[in-house]
Image (cartoon, rainbow, N blue to C red):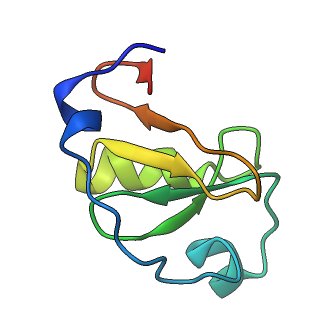
Amino acid sequence: MSTCDHIAQAQDPSPRTPEGCEECLASGGSWVHLRRCLSCGHIGCCDSSPSKHATAHFKEIGHPVVASFEPGENWRWCYVDNVIG
């Protein structure tokens, strides 16, 4: 796995909505997989989900790194550098 400064400096905030994607929960939407923002703890749905809220959060807020919020998965993704770590 490659790394980047964003991943190396990422924090480990508590999930804001541990039960699922914030926006999908509010709108009644659904998700495939979940991602946790490592800047603020936002939980958003992945790009395989209908609304792609994790990527939308990056585009709107600019927080660069997410981690999988799926049980048993331990990886991080940097939107800026397009790298997994």
Q: Residue at x 26, y 48 (%)?
A: 10
Q: Residue 30, located in which quarter of the rendered image? A: bottom right
Q: Is residue 81 above or below residue 19?
A: above
Foreground of the two, 18 or 54: 18
Q: Is residue 17 left or right of residue 61?
A: right
Q: Is residue 55 left or right of residue 51?
A: left
Foreground of the two, 61 or 43: 43
Q: Residue at x 30, y 53 (%)?
A: 60
Residue 34: percent from left, percent from top: 67, 57
Q: Is residue 60 left or right of residue 19?
A: left
Residue 73: percent from left, percent from top: 69, 46
Foreground of the two, 61 or 69: 69
Q: Residue at x 35, y 43 (%)?
A: 65
Residue 6: percent from left, percent from top: 21, 35
Q: Residue 71, located in which quarter of the rendered image? A: bottom right
Foreground of the two, 65 or 46: 65
**Residue sitting farthest toward the top:** 2
Q: What is the count of numbered marks?
A: 0
Residue 1: percent from left, percent from top: 48, 15
Classify the position of the C terminus by image quarter: top left
Q: Residue at x 25, y 22 (%)?
A: 4
Q: Is residue 23 above or below residue 45?
A: below
